[in-house]
Amino acid sequence: MAIHHKPRIGADVLVPFILIALVFGGLFWQKYQEARQLPDTPPGKQGTAATKKVTLFFGDDESHLIREAREVEACDDRTTCLRSLLEELFVGPVGELTAVIPEWTTINSVRIEGDLATIDLGKDFAEALEPGSSAEMMAVYAIVNTVCINMPEIRHVKITLDGDQSARLRHLDLSEPLEPDYSLEPQPAATPQQGNK
């Protein structure tokens, strides 16, 4: 009795089929990846609307507030801008200046009503401050000055602690809204009068 073998698919048919499947699979994968990627910023528009320059206030060794410029992401919503500005301030300086906001200070909430910004911080802000009125003034006015100089439409800043509207530090009363105080910056040295020789 004769044994009949089933015809086997030859390599000359199988190899081209596998190659075609790999090519089409690669093309589909490439299209899938391109569809998931965000479009690049058009040439010539990079760095214009994506970032903005802000001024932050930090301390020096002589209890002065010093300005530090920094590039941050641009934003449209005022409340979002205020929160991101404070977060950038709370990160601390990138240069040789000193952070005046205690590390790990939490921002509970921010609110803007007219020309008033209300910033609710955690009580850890007050508890972690260095002792002394100077440290309190530096920390509070680093916040107030940073907010008001970058958002000129805000003229007063109210700082609350865990929702306490009449919060008070050891030496500084926070129950009323505060205006910026740029007198904490070092004053320029007086130049000698030219007539005196």
Image (cartoon, rainbow, N blue to C red):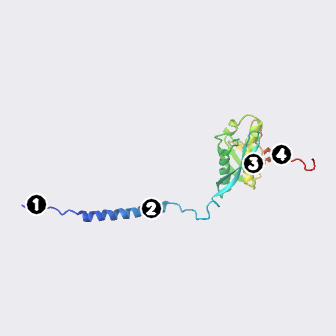
Alpha carbons under labels 3 and 1: distance apart: 96 Å
Measured Cα–Cα span from mark 3 to mark 4: 22 Å
Query: Rounded to the nearest whole Å, what is the CA distance between mark 2 and mark 1?
Result: 50 Å
Q: Which residue is mark 3?
A: 145
Q: CA distance from mark 2 to mark 3?
A: 49 Å
* Structural distance between the alpha carbons of marks 4 and 1: 110 Å
Crowdedness of circle 4 by 10 Å Cα count: few (<14), some, many (20+)?
A: few
Q: Residue 74 sits in which quadrant?
A: bottom right
The amino acid at mark 1 is: Ile
The label shown at residue 83 is none
Spot occupied by residue 78 in the image (x, y as percentages of width and height): 68, 56
- Horizontal and vertical percent for residue 118? 71, 48
Which residue is the site of mark 2? 32
Q: How many residues crowd around disc 1 within 10 Å: few (fewer than 14), some, or many (20 or more)?
A: few
Q: Secondary structure at mark 2?
A: helix
- Residue at x 77%, y 52% (from the top left corner): 155
Q: Earlier in the sequence, mark 2 or mark 3?
A: 2
Q: Earlier in the sequence, mark 3 or mark 4?
A: 3
Residue type at mark 4 is Ala
139 sits left or right of 49 in the view: right
Give the label on residue 189, or none: 4
Q: Amino acid at mark 3?
A: Asn
